[in-house]
Image (cartoon, rainbow, N blue to C red):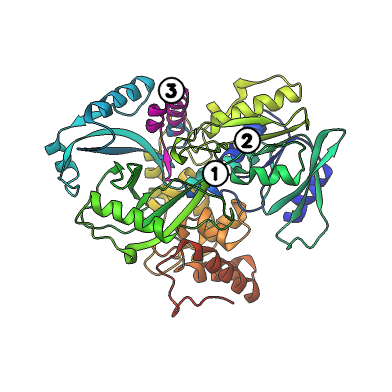
Amino acid sequence: MRSKALSDIADREFDVIVIGAGINGAGIAREAARRNLRVLLLDKGDIAGGTSAWSTRLIHGGLRYLEHGELKLVRESLRERERLLSAAPHLVRPLPMLVPVYAGGRRSLSAIRAGMLAYDLLSFDKSLGRHRMLSRAETLRRAPGLSAKGLRGAALYFDAQVEYAERLVLENVLSAREWGASVLTYARVERGLVEGGAMRGVAFVDLIDGGRRPQHQAFASVVLNVAGPWVDEVVAQVPCPAAARLVGGTKGSHLVVANFPGAPREALYAEAATDRRPFFIIPWNKLYLIGTTDTRYAGDLDQVMANEDEIEYLLRETNHLIPASGLTRDSVLYTYSGVRPLAFQADGAAGGITRRHFLHDHAPALEGFVSVVGGKLTTYRSLAEQAIDLVCKKLRRRVLTIDSTAFDNLPGAPPRGSDMAEFGAHFAADSPLPAATNARLLRVYGVRAAEVLDVCREHSRLCEPLVAGGEAVAAEVIFSFRHEIAETLTDCLLRRTMLGLNSACGLDVVEPAACVAQEFLGWDQQRADREINKYRRHVRRFHPRAFSAQNNPDPA
């Protein structure tokens, strides 16, 4: 199948090549294909293999952007949040958020109240409830684990959570393919094909074969550089003359912990005692997510890791906010970090760098080449519209906004006019699987859970739990490779089945998953061992507690 994809690319000329399969690149590819453009999406790694996977997993209206006066960004975020709640209800769900206010904090109760009123006004068309201001007593009844010392009260408002951001990206790519886009992962762009001062395409190597074959080429009228924090690296590789630095990324790190004493039922959006930065404690994936940090980063973009200072900072702040928590370094199940692809700004605090996105047209230095800077999970679709509007102008095509993705559900969502509860009831009635497994399949795959069930029916072995007592079934491994563009076991566990995000960081399922691939996908023992070892090496940067020398030896 991969050789055919490479052959098809060589035989076609595209309207637009998109470099980068994170949320912005995926959304742009979908928007382009929806408007009948011939589009090729390339990434040097997997879909959602970079920054998109390492956010705080919120689809938020940008409450904190109010204090920077970015009202347009807040309004855009709120509008797109509402669209995602409708277009992807299986992935994006309402999230109640509690904002405790303490004496001596940066923001008083009156300031928080004013911000909440502005937030409600800007989200006049929302389906979520309005905010409420809570007294000190009401706050402690709602979150009894909070420190009572100096507590003045709290605000309660609603935002949204995307539990599996990776699958939001994936479903955009699957939708793009349904509309005719070509997609190739593990294809690293090495240089631009420049002729007469204009981009005519790119040369890339196939990393699945180890880059041993000669460079492949793909041709297009416009090339969009949507490589996130790697944008400047792509510009340098093209190369683009007289190119100034575009991205000045900041690093955000998170901790994942199990339930703990005083853990909140609802998400907390609090102010750190050390430096007054905002941070979150969020129920997530039957665990808790604590983050994030925000520091300038100039290290290896392919090996971003939480350092011990960041881990200590987040533990300390959680223990200060929830005194009974008693979290220690041993409480951390694993960590993750990513670099935000923010616009370069030489001076100033990292938290003050704008979260707006920009389309940087490299013309006239190089025609047909545009770099995308910034962007967030929440606003990816509106960014995609703007990017493809620009592409259409460059192609001298009519801008067809009526064909925009604004009106389309993602593949895992039920058709407009029906809901997930209705589909879920029918699915459970038809499924021979246990109730907990049905619930998991619906949460991960939405209505596409029915397609996973079809794979289950091929063989009784595929209906069995991947591990004893687990909710995941063996068929999910097969489904990820056959129907969801997975190329490696790491793709399968971290960005398809989502099993790599469990309390063991997927180390408990890696060998059973490889065994399923051997039995049903024809892997030999050599490939199975190689894939297992690659996964173990990959997740070491997340500091998984489950990694012990006894049962998970460090592969050579």
Give the spatial CA distance, label 2 vs label 1. 13 Å
Residue 372 location (% of width, % of height)? 62, 35
Residue occupying image coordinates x 75% and y 28%: 363
Helix, strand or loop for disc 3: helix
Helix, strand or loop for disc 2: strand
Q: Is residue 105 left or right of residue 256?
A: left
Instruction: Report which residue position mark 1 lands on.
Output: 249
* Quadrant location of the C terminus in the rendered image: bottom right
Q: Which residue lies furthest to the front in this view?
A: 347
Instruction: Report which residue position mark 3 lands on.
Output: 71
The vertical placement of 95 against 253, above or below, is above
Instruction: Report which residue position mark 2 lands on.
Output: 372
Query: Which segment did they paint magenta?
Result: 56-84
Residue 403 visible in the current orientation: yes
Residue 65 location (% of width, % of height)? 41, 30
Task: State yes or no: discs 2 and 1 in contact (Cβ < 8 Å).
Answer: no
Magenta-drawn stretch contains 46: no
Specify the amino acid type for callout 2: Val
* Mark 1 closeness class: few <14, some 14–19, many ≥20 residues within 10 Å: many
Residue 155 location (% of width, % of height)? 24, 33
Residue occupying image coordinates x 35% and y 42%: 277
Give the spatial CA distance, label 2 vs label 3. 21 Å
Residue occupying image coordinates x 60% and y 57%: 481
* Mark 3 closeness class: few <14, some 14–19, many ≥20 residues within 10 Å: some
Mark toward the start of the polypeptide (2 vs 3): 3
Mark toward the start of the polypeptide (2 vs 1): 1
Helix, strand or loop for disc 1: loop
Residue 286 visible in the current orientation: no
Closer to the camera in the image, 352 or 70: 352
- When asked about the image quadrant of residue 247, the answer is top right
Residue 21 location (% of width, % of height)? 62, 45
Specify the amino acid type for callout 3: Leu
